[in-house]
Amino acid sequence: MKEKTELLTQGVTSHVPAILEEIQRLRAREERRDMQWTKVEKEMETLKAEMERAKIKQGNLEVKVEVLSTALDNKSKEAEIKNVERERLEKEIGKLEAKVSEQRKAIETEKSERKLENGK
């Protein structure tokens, strides 16, 4: 029995270097994975920070767009009001031109009548 135990111990002992080598290999592999995971976590934190900054920038841009949209709407309303006023003034000018034309004809008619009266 003692011999069997010694043989068994020698058999196990002969495998110890291989087992230790495998343990080292597995630890190294685990360390590489841990380093990769740490790197991934850092990248995720960086991306989260970038996303937060992008959201803030987007919010600022949305505010600017709203301000510009409001300003554009106001300018459009002002332009529409000016167009309506211009059209109203053009109609008024047209009416005044028609009156001036009528008055000119009336004056010319009156001049012609006076010439005829003075000529008689």
Image (cartoon, helix red, strand yellow):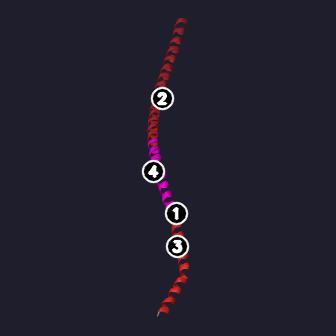
Q: How far across and down, in percent of the image, does residue 99 sit?
A: 47, 21
Asked whether 70 or 12 is in front, the reply is 12
- Count all numbered tags in the image, as a single digit: 4
User: Dot 3 surroundings within 10 Å: few (below 14), some, or many (20 or more)?
Assistant: few
Q: Earlier in the sequence, mark 4 or mark 1?
A: 1
Type of the residue with mark 2: Arg
Distance, label 4 to label 1, CA atoms, is 26 Å
Measure how far apart labels 3 and 2 are at the Cα level: 86 Å
Give the Cα separation between the discs numbered 3 and 1: 14 Å
Residue drawn at 52 percent across, 7 percent down: 117
The residue beneath circle 2 is: 86
Disc 4 element: helix
Q: Which residue is mark 1?
A: 35
Q: Nearer the viewer, residue 92 or 68?
A: 68
Q: Earlier in the sequence, mark 3 or mark 1?
A: 3
21 sits to left or right of 89: right
Query: On the image, numbered disc 3 is attached to which residue?
Result: 26
Magenta stretch prevailing secondary structure = helix
Q: Amino acid at mark 4?
A: Glu
Q: Quadrant of the C terminus?
A: top right
Between marks 4 and 3, how big is the CA–CA gap?
Answer: 38 Å
Where does residue 97 sit, x and y in percent of width and height? 50, 22
Residue placed under numbered mark 4 in the picture:
52
Lower position in the chain sequence, tag 2 or tag 4: 4
Residue sitting at the far front: 2
Coordinates of residue 47 in the picture (x, y in percent)? 49, 55
Q: Which mark is residue 19?
A: none
Q: Amino acid at mark 3?
A: Leu
Local SS, label 1: helix
Specify the segment rendered in magenta: 36-64
Question: Which tag, 3 or 2, sits closer to the chain's start?
Answer: 3
Could one spot residue 120 in this view of the protein?
Answer: no
